[in-house]
Image (cartoon, helix red, strand yellow):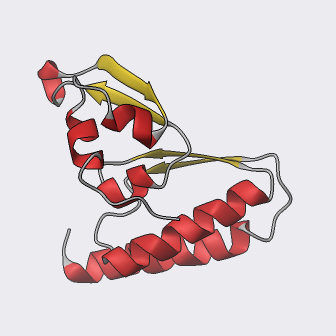
């Protein structure tokens, strides 16, 4: 993606999420790598918005590689051990802390390096 496309996509995501947080709960929101092109402060805002959706009784499922977002997750499903033909195996399921303690998890190795956030 180029910078202009990233800005347009991020702007559309913000608009969509702003409208969605006004809805009642009971919805499933599925996102594929929503942090692509976002600055880490924008990722922090995205996490807050996801929390708002969850607090309103919705479910949020995110397919993501961004460690900042993974660390903030309630639950992680880690597939691997690698991408493409070298992946597809269930490596771990649990909280980010449980994934960090999983010796088989490459994601866990990165999570173990991330300071805990409130």
Give the residue at x 80% y 71%: 22
State the image coordinates of residue 85 (x, y, percent, origin top left): 14, 20
Numbered label tally: 0
Give the residue at x 19% y 24%: 81
Q: In this view, does 111 lie to the left or right of 109?
A: right
State the image coordinates of residue 40 (x, y, percent, origin top left): 33, 75
Q: Is residue 103 left or right of residue 115?
A: left
Q: In this view, does 113 lie to the left or right of 29?
A: left
Between 26 and 41, the one nearer to me in the picture = 41
Q: Is residue 18 left or right of residue 55?
A: left
Between 3 and 61, the one nearer to me in the picture = 61
Residue 40 lies, with reference to residue 62, above or below; the image says below
State the image coordinates of residue 5 (x, y, percent, origin top left): 29, 76
Which of the 4 image quarters holds residue 19?
Answer: bottom right
Q: The N terminus is located in which quarter?
A: bottom left
Residue 72 lies, with reference to residue 15, above or below; the image says above
Between 116 and 82, the one nearer to me in the picture = 116
Q: Residue furthest right?
A: 24
Residue 95 lies, with reference to residue 82, above or below; the image says below
State the image coordinates of residue 96 (x, y, percent, origin top left): 43, 42
Give the residue at x 35% y 30%: 78
């Amino acid at each position: 993606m180029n910078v202009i496309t990233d800005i347009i996509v991020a702007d559309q995501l913000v608009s969509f999420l702003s409208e969605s947080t006004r809805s009642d709960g009971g919805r499933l929101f599925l996102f594929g790598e929503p942090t692509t092109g976002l600055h880490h402060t924008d990722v922090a805002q995205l996490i807050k918005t996801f929390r708002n959706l969850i607090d309103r009784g919705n479910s949020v499922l995110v397919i993501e590689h961004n460690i900042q977002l993974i660390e903030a997750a309630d639950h992680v499903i880690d597939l691997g051990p690698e991408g493409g033909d070298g992946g597809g195996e269930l490596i771990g399921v649990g909280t980010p802390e449980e994934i960090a303690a999983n010796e088989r998890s490459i994601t866990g190795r990165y999570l173990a390096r991330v300071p805990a956030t409130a």
